[in-house]
Image (tube, rainbow, N blue to C red):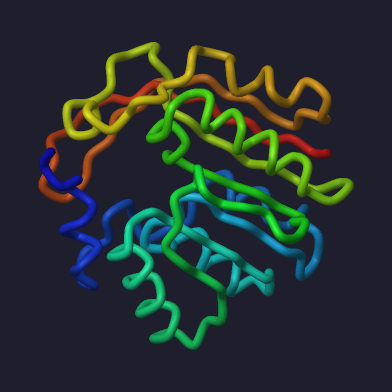
Amino acid sequence: MTEPFWEKSYKDDNVSTFGVHPNPTIAEKWPIFASNGAVLEVGCGEGKNAIFLAQKGFAVDAFDISVAGIAKLKRLASKHHIELNAWAQDLREFGFDKEYDVVTSHGTLHFVARQDWKDFILRAKEHTRSNGIHIMQIFTNKVPAAPDIAPLAIGLANEGELFDLYRDWRILETKAYVFEDEHPGVDKHFHASNKIVAIR
């Protein structure tokens, strides 16, 4: 299988693989997070969300399966004197050893089988403090996976499947949408996505 496009750009500190600004939902919602709370970002890539939240005073744990992505995150954090905890990890093998105030994942869960990401979310819910927040986003099968990720996107969700996992939480926001995307060296393409913001 060809190496994913992001592995090349993760090795170049002069290229921003997924943009320099935090995810819009993170940028909007962080003021309602528990002050100085513990945050876990799953599939952090080169760290635009993790670094942003650490700058806001949160205690950030962040992991990604990409060794190159984590190395870049650490270089960027060190350059800006930002403290956070980041490591390379397969989300299927992650074991919670503490509770979090925030758990978030963007554009990652669909890269493992459907049952694996569901199991992860259930474990994450169990290890989220009262009034803790989840912000989760996953690609769905409403449109076919874009050619650049199709071989890897083995767990595309059915529309609404993510939302069903949070019926027992207070849901602040859900969104189902299709968007156009592009990355360094990759043609413009479309993704279908579901996003939820929910409070325990």
Frontmost residue, 183 versus 84 = 84
Quadrant containing the C terminus is top right
Is 19 displayed left or right of 126 in the figure? Answer: left
**Percent position of residue 98, x then y:** 75, 60
Identify the residue shown where x is 68% and y is 54%: 96
Q: Position of residue 146 (x, y in %)?
A: 23, 26
Residue 3, placed above or below residue 73: above
Q: How many marks?
A: 0
In the rendered view, tell whether residue 114 sits above or below residue 21.
above
39 relative position to 15: left or right: right
Quarter residue 80 falls in = bottom left
Q: Residue 130: image x %, image y %?
A: 89, 47
Vertical comparison of 200 with 83: above or below: above
Q: Is residue 106 left or right of residue 68?
A: right
Q: Answer above or below: position of 93 versus 193.
A: below
The residue located at (48%, 56%) in the rendering is: 22
Q: Could you tell me which residue is drawn at 64 percent across and 71 percent down? A: 56
Horizontal and vertical percent for residue 145? 28, 22
| Residue nearest the observer in this picture, 57 or 70 | 70
**Image quadrant for the N terminus?**
top left
Residue beneath the point at 52% across and 20% down: 176
